[in-house]
């Protein structure tokens, strides 16, 4: 959202904000970053789940 505000408030592209011409370009640039962030979070949570399962298996043995 900060990228939208910076683009439309501090540059000369305010006319594009009215027509929403830059919305898709900004979202196309943010999509890979958001997918990467989601993947990192998913791998972190999955890794913690695997570690807790291993600890439980080792404590039972």
Image (spheres, rainbow, N blue to C red):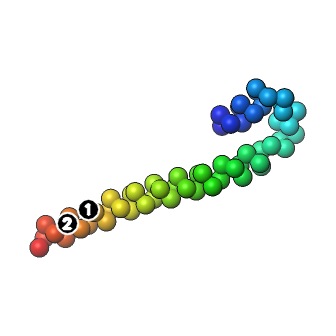
Can you give x and y, in whole percent of width and height, for residue 13 in the image? 84, 33
Residue drawn at 16 percent across, 69 percent down:
58
Can you give x and y, in whole percent of width and height, for residue 55 in the image? 20, 64
Residue drawn at 68 percent across, 36 percent down:
3
- Left or right: 34 in relation to 52: right
Q: Quarter of the image for the N terminus: give it.
A: top right
- Left or right: 25 in relation to 16: left
Question: In the drawing, what numbered circle is on residue 4?
Answer: none
Of all residues, the one furthest to the top in this rendering is 10
Q: Is label 2 in contact with label 1 (beta carbons under 8 Å)?
A: yes
- Left or right: 7 in relation to 54: right
Please tell me in which quadrant of the rendered image residue 48 appears: bottom left
Residue drawn at 58 percent across, 56 percent down:
35
Which residue is identified by label 1?
52
Instruction: Estimate the spatial distance between the alpha carbons at disc 2 and disc 1, rounded to whole Å.
Output: 6 Å
Q: Is residue 47 above or below residue 19?
A: below
Q: Residues within 10 Å of mark 1 (few under 14, many from 20)?
A: few
- Left or right: 39 in relation to 12: left
Can you give x and y, in whole percent of width and height, for residue 59 in the image? 13, 66
Can you give x and y, in whole percent of width and height, for residue 53 in the image? 26, 66
Q: Residues within 10 Å of mark 2 (few under 14, many from 20)?
A: few
Residue drawn at 82 percent across, 36 percent down:
17
Number of callouts in the render? 2
Secondary structure, mark 1, is: helix
Secondary structure, mark 2, is: helix
Which residue is identified by label 2?
56
Please tell me in which quadrant of the rendered image residue 8 appears: top right
């Amino acid at each position: 959202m900060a990228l939208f505000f910076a683009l439309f408030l501090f540059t000369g592209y305010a006319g594009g904000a009215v027509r929403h011409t830059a919305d898709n370009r900004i979202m196309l640039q943010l999509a890979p970053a958001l997918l990467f962030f989601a993947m990192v979070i998913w791998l972190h949570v999955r890794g913690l789940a695997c570690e807790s399962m291993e600890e439980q298996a080792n404590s039972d043995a």
